[in-house]
Image (cartoon, coloured by chain):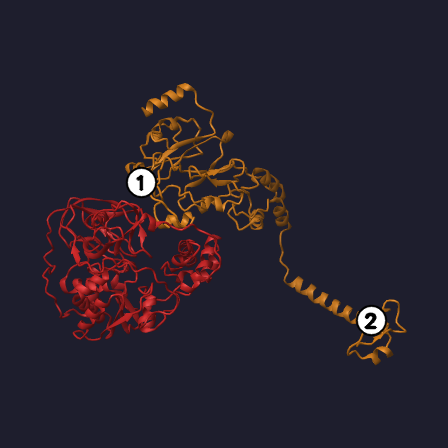
Chain colours: A red, B orange
Amino acid sequence: MKTFKLGGVHPEENKISANKVIEVLPLPKQACVPVTQHLGAPSTIVVEKGATVKVGQLLAKSEGFIGANTHSPFSGKVSKIDTIIDTSGYRRPAVFIDVEDDEWDESIDRSSDIRYEINLSRLEIIDRIKTMGIVGLGGATFPSHVKLMVPEGKKAMVLIINGVECEPYLTSDHRLMLERGEEMMIGVSILMKALEVNKAIIGIENNKPDAINHLKSLCSKFNGIEICPLKVKYPQGAEKQLIKAAVNREVPSGKLPIEVGCVVNNAGTAFAVYEAVQKNKPLIERVITVTGKSVKKSCNLMARIGTSVSELIDFAGGLPEDTGKVISGGPMMGKALNVLDIPVMKGTSGILIMTQKESKRVVVQNCIRCGKCITVCPMGLEPYKLAQLSEIENYEMSESEKVLDCIECGSCQFTCPAGRPLLDYVRLGKYEVGQIIRNRTKK
Amino acid sequence: MFHVHYFRDSGKLLNLPVTFLNTDYEYLKENSVNEIVLYAVISLGLIGVFAAVVLYIVAQKFKVIEDPKIDEVTDLLPGANCGGCGFAGCRNFAEAIVKADSLENLSCPVGGASVMTQIGPVIGVEAIIGEPKIAVVRCNGSRAKAAPKTQYEGAKSCQFVHNLFSGESGCPHGCLGLGDCAFSCKFDAIYIDEITGLPVVSNEKCVACGACVKACPRSIIELRYKGKKDRRIFVSCVNKEKGVLSKKNCEVACIGCGKCVKTCPYEAITLENNLAYINDEKCKLCRKCVEVCPTSAIVELNFPPRKEKAEASTEAIEA
């Protein structure tokens, strides 16, 4: 079975909620929709205080090429336009909505029947994806239409769909592939048309045999789509590692996947593309796993964007008493939250609750040069060295040691027997080197 | 085994045992050693003269004309190479001094007035002596006053934490207390107090080089005038959020109420983005603003304790 060669770790899988059917979260009374939920230029708000909005109405318009629109996931009244604390603890502009009823915009097709024929042309598809505010749902929230606009002189040869879900605990993509597999496959066909490729590979780790079998049985209906089961290894869901595993090509340092003729999209994104193109539905809801060993009712929820995280946790049986950490995302790359009253965003793939015992960090000891971090680094870097260079603030050398190639998967910190915060320092190095490069290009 | 020979006709100098391996023994026997030495001295001497001539010509051709004053000024400077003056090092600064017409905006923060007055006569201009400055930490959110809501256990780097999240107390502008400033200080003048978690600047050691100002990712540290008898008054907060929000995270945050602006008789205080700022050029250290501040965000340093009357009035305001 295929996998990537260099490095990688095997954290405990803990896919507790793998057998839980996706449930629809009841609508909250109040919601708060942050207007910039993607990578790139911030969006500008187009509604005013006191305005009544419908589900699917535009709230904020994207500025610039790399940007995404934000639509209202609720119907009701805009109570205020203010700021809200996001996952980082900093305040970001957001639209607060008092939810009334569930009135949808007329243009959205809410019927449950599946539409197979793709009537739109290539450019129309890309335009639709742009206006519907689709972003990469794997977590990085990169605007999807940008990926589909292949730069001149480059040619996409294969579309890779990321159904790997290599993060422990998370099961949202797994459930989506299993329950909405057919829609997702149509989404893949749409993406293939937009990219003008005739081959797509769906990479799935073999700890999800039910999803692999289900999609394999659907394959005969769709042309050019192939299922590629992969050996379980973290971080297989990272773009470059997945390309290496699925088609055995290596993306050069500092280049995009299009350099080797690949475009990678998440399984969740493919489903969102189906809904946007075939049903005219903007990205207003997504599947979120709420899980943890101490959680009473681990579940997969279809939640509207803008719902408070605390409501999700309440649905899953409330916050356990011995909670040490609440993480947005998976345990390896997710971010610990400092408040629970933050809204669900386009990039929130899961809410993970860890007990005090689990969340305790080990005591930091000295580096003993065992080299474990080097053996597990999937990018072939030397994390101990990069961390040390950041500690002594030698960022020129960090740059020549290719600190910018780091994908921040956290394998080095996971494996370090001395419990050193390697990734923290590597991230610092990445930031400082980015700053140096920006200053250099300015001059 | 090697054979050991002695030169019968050699001078005193070479009356030593010599081991010959492949040397032409016969040749050495026939020619006197003095002759060999003579040839060597003459040939090496000629090479030396030739090389000297080449070097001299090259040196003349590529001569860098440098002002001897630069060396003189460099000798006067402290040689700490701290970069506090804004130049790459002491020599770089000396070059700038010699080039410049006046000493305006050029000042060595480490050497201070005494060094600048010495440099003045060397380049033939009057030294302009500014008032001495000192680094001031504009955050008073200690662990007691801005209670931590979360616990951070990662890398000890303010810059990293600043990029990651708002900090343990939740204040997005407050001090993170991980000591980037202390690490950047070359004069050991700043350290993190373990109880309050805030940096403390030493009055004696700080030379106002500005390294900590650059190191702080939240621009909390500022260079301010040292003041008479080290007495200083400043707003110890940089939070630009609205009063309600900043008060949630910290007891001693500036809430932008503007009381101090109205009170100040010298118009030294300005209010911008919900934050008061005391201009240290205009401030006459009257301490009236300290009394009226409802959150005690304005801090006075090194003043003698107030008389009882004054204390009573502050209590009345608090009540």
- As rendered, which of B98 and A297 lies closer to the eye? A297
Q: Chain of mark 2?
A: B
Residue type (three-letter) at the residue carrying disc 2: Val
Q: Identify residue for label 1.
A: B241
| In the image: residue B30, left or right of residue A57 | right
User: Toward which corner of the image does residue B250 lie, by quadrant?
Assistant: top left
Spatial distance from mark 2 to mark 1, Cα to Cα? 88 Å
Q: Where residue A190 appears, x then y in whole percent?
A: 19, 69
x, y percent for residue A439: 42, 56
Q: Circle 2 sits in a helix, a strand or a loop, which is it?
A: helix
Residue drawn 20% across and 62% down? A176
| Residue named by callout 2 | B37
Q: Amino acid at mark 1?
A: Glu
Q: Is residue B149 left or right of residue A389?
A: left
Residue positioned 53% across, 40% down in the render: B207
User: Who is closer to the viewer here, A10 or A82?
Assistant: A10
Pointer 2 and pointer 1: residues touching (CB < 8 Å)?
no
- Observer able to see residue A223: yes
Where is residue B297? Give x, y as percent.
Answer: 37, 33
Q: Position of residue B100 (x, y in %)?
A: 55, 47
Mark 2 or mark 1, earlier in chain: 2
How many neighbours does mark 1 have within 10 angstroms: few (below 14), some (14-19), or many (20 or more)?
Answer: many
Crowd around label 2: few <14 · some 14–19 · many ≥20 (10 Å): few
How many numbered tags mark residues here? 2
Farthest residue, direction top: B309
Q: Is residue B52 left or right of residue A101?
A: right
Mark yes or no: residue A402 visible. no
Q: Is residue A308 above or below residue B4?
A: above
